[in-house]
Image (cartoon, grey):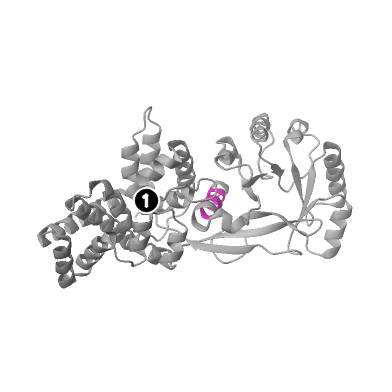
Amino acid sequence: MEVFVARQPIFTEKEDVFAYELLYRNNQVNQFPQIDGDKATADVIINSFLNIGIDELSNGKPCFINFTDNLLKVKLPTFFHPKEIVIEILESVEISAELIQICKELKELGYQIVLDDFVLNEQNPYLSRLLPCIDIIKVDFQNTSVLMREKIESLAKKMKIKLLAEKIETREEFSEAASSGYQYFQGYFFSKPVIVSSKDIPVNIHSYYEIINLLSADEPSVDKITKLIEQDLSLSYKLLKLINSPSYRPRQKISSIRQAIVLLGLIEIQKWIFVLAVRETKGVKKDLSKEMVSMSLTRAKMSESIAIQLQRFTEASSYFMTGMFSLMDTLLNMPMEKVLNDLPLQENICEALNGQSNEYKKVLDLTIAVEMGNWEMASQLCKHLNIPEESAFHSYHQSIKWAKQIIEMDTSL
């Protein structure tokens, strides 16, 4: 499943890139489709941070992201580092006492806050209390009158708030905005939004709610949470992408989902599960590749089962991950080497997935041989691993049943 984000640069007066605005897109058509605002923001966040990679999108620059009233109230911006994002408050968000309190808290945490498409309403009793929290005001040069712009410019100068001129389409408009005191500029004169795409993995929305319930317990069970995440290929992949991002990147390589959960922490897991749940429940039903997910789960479970038969109990979870990620190149439509560059998997798992011979690869090869009905190869591998053929076939059938149960748990499939 292909996913998209549009990225438009924001420039300084010297025409250097100051930041990027990340915009929702659902295909290669470069325009914003009509969609629920919560869903759009959650989609931008997931696709930017977990599918494409925020470091690839931002080049180290901060990213402007629109936040709705609902997402501000649940403090979604605090899930991210203040250096990574700039909070854009949409013009549709009502200026209220609650919004002022939210903005004060965000400012204390070090976030920059922007008023998007600002139109001055001097009758609003809360405006004077909100403005001290604001770092930048965005002014739409195409849809704001000269008189209104002059009032905003005067107010911004008085409050020492920076100005961003958006929808700048000509050199003349750029010069006009610069001479009027604007520090930042955005629009087609500089650059149209560039669409960046990647692949996403089909989701199991059922597991999100189960994990949220487990995380809400007084003493959350890491083992139960691990089990649920291991059963969800999409969530496992996103978890590893997240922990490999610049904000979290671990010193050691990952050998199991449990290790990733412990390193990331339950609070961070809870935050991202929430974002994922918002995104999926607000979205439309997608065409999911059930068969590919089922095959990945089957390979994972069988690889784990073979490892246990080989009495490699402490490594069983690593064999599980080898099987689970063995089809990731097909699901994401990219070379396995590129997939593994984005994931912090331990070396022997990466070697096996890249086709290099080791014990992980031999167990995976046995799983694939049985899957494809290559009985001669399966027989040879069983002899090499010193396990009965009957045990390998039994493990495969049990793994198919397990994968089927997991898939059927998601009523949206």
Q: Evaluate whether residue 90 shows in this view.
A: yes
Relative to 151, say whether 125 is above or below. Answer: above
Main SS, magenta region, reads: helix
- The residue tagged 1 is 204
Q: Position of residue 63 (x, y in %)?
A: 64, 51
Instruction: Residue at 79% x, 41% y: name it.
Output: 161
Q: Judge whether residue 41 is colored magenta.
A: yes
Tell me: 316 left or right of 213: left
Instruction: Residue at 75% x, 63% y: name it.
Output: 190
Q: Helix, strand, or loop for circle 1?
A: loop
Q: Position of residue 86 (x, y in %)?
A: 66, 46
Q: Residues within 10 Å of mark 1 (few under 14, many from 20)?
A: many
Tell me: 214 left or right of 166: left
Query: What residue range appears in magenta?
Result: 39-47
Q: Judge whether residue 252 is colored magenta.
A: no
Tell me: 242 left or right of 102: left
Q: Nearer the viewer, residue 309 or 98?
A: 309
Q: Nearer the viewer, residue 369 or 87?
A: 369
Q: Nearer the viewer, residue 210 or 399?
A: 399
Instruction: Residue at 23% x, 62% y: name it.
Output: 367
